[in-house]
């Protein structure tokens, strides 16, 4: 039977010296930087899972993953990758899981997903993407993790609405508190087609709705001083309420409203 191999503080040459009978390969805490041509072709017959974690990978040769047609899971988390290229995946036709989390990715070539017809899980969290086109995603995808990317409101609204309609899961513990924002973006986008096409109008729509929430909160006098666990606001607001509020001080609706006003002013200044 094929074996599992874990390596750290090694080079690609050291990896190539290992036995070819490997089904899962984990390389971590190494200084690889550049993955060379056919770097893992020796393991093509049995390799189903390849994980290169925290290895300072910055670039990858177009033929680095050549012949790995049996690979089902490719993980390249916590590296220094800035763009994702179609050529990397030309032989990975049976890939089902792709993890590119915690890199510095700003761009994914449009045809990447054409090479991955069987992809079911895509993890792109904690990168630098401003948009991810849902229409480019494979039809069979059922899990997508994208939190920690500076997606525009316009793009996030389009992406999460598509995911809702196609029953693609993206909820995790980290982004559970942002689902309120997605519902608000859907409301803005569905309500006016012109708003859905404009980042500025989407921001204005979100801010107007926040003001409406603020007005509703203020109109209920008895709710103003009451303590609550938290308020549905973006992670920045909830996190700052949790970290800034001292242990002996309760988080009241009034305190939340003050934070909400501050957030609205900051968001408006970003136009």
Image (spheres, rainbow, N blue to C red):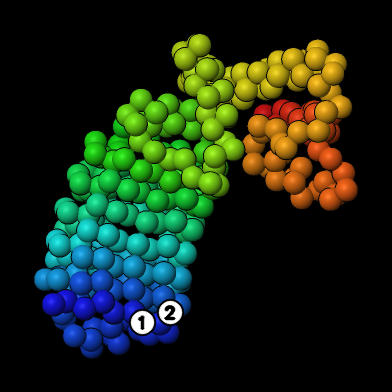
> Residue shown at 28%/46% (left/top)?
120
**Whether label 1 touches label 2, CB < 8 Å:** yes
Q: Is residue 69 left or right of residue 194?
A: left
- Percent across and percent down for residue 49 are 26, 66
- Percent across and percent down for residue 11 are 35, 84
Q: Is residue 268 left or right of residue 164?
A: right
> Residue shown at 28%/67% (left/top)?
50
Q: Residues within 10 Å of mark 1 (few under 14, many from 20)?
A: some
- State the residue in front, 77 or 129: 77
Residue beneath disc 1 = 7
Report whether residue 42 is seen.
Answer: no
- State the residue in front, 42 or 199: 42
For residue 30, which numbered disc appears in the image? 2
Report whether residue 20 is seen.
Answer: yes
- Percent across and percent down for residue 171 are 47, 40
Q: Circle 1 sits in a helix, a strand or a loop, which is it?
A: strand
- Percent across and percent down for residue 70 are 15, 62
Image height check: is 101 above or below 224?
below
Q: Circle 2 sits in a helix, a strand or a loop, which is it?
A: loop
Structural distance between the alpha carbons of marks 1 and 2: 9 Å
């Amino acid at each position: 039977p094929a074996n599992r191999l874990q390596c750290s503080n090694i080079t690609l040459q050291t990896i190539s010296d290992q036995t070819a009978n490997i089904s899962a390969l984990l390389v971590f805490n190494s200084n690889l930087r550049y993955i060379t041509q056919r770097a893992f072709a020796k393991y093509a017959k049995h390799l189903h899972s390849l994980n290169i974690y925290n290895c300072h990978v910055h670039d990858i040769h177009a033929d680095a993953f050549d012949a790995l047609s049996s690979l089902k899971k490719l993980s390249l988390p916590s590296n220094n990758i800035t763009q994702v290229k179609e050529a990397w995946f030309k032989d990975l036709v049976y890939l089902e899981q792709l993890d590119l989390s915690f890199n510095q990715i700003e761009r994914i070539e449009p045809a990447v997903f054409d090479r991955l017809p069987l992809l079911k899980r895509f993890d792109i969290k904690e990168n630098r993407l401003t948009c991810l086109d849902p229409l480019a995603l494979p039809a069979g995808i059922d899990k997508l993790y994208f939190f920690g990317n500076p997606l525009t409101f316009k793009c996030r609204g389009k992406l999460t609405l598509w995911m809702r309609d196609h029953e693609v899961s993206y909820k995790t513990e980290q982004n559970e508190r942002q689902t309120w924002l997605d519902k608000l973006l859907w409301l803005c986008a569905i309500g006016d087609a012109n708003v859905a096409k404009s980042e500025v109008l989407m921001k204005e729509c979100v801010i107007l709705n926040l003001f409406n929430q603020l007005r509703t909160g203020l109109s209920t006098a008895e709710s103003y001083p009451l303590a609550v666990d938290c308020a549905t606001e973006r992670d920045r607001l909830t996190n700052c309420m949790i970290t800034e509020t001292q242990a002996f001080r309760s988080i009241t609706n009034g305190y939340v409203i003050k934070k909400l006003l501050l957030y609205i002013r900051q968001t408006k200044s970003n136009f």
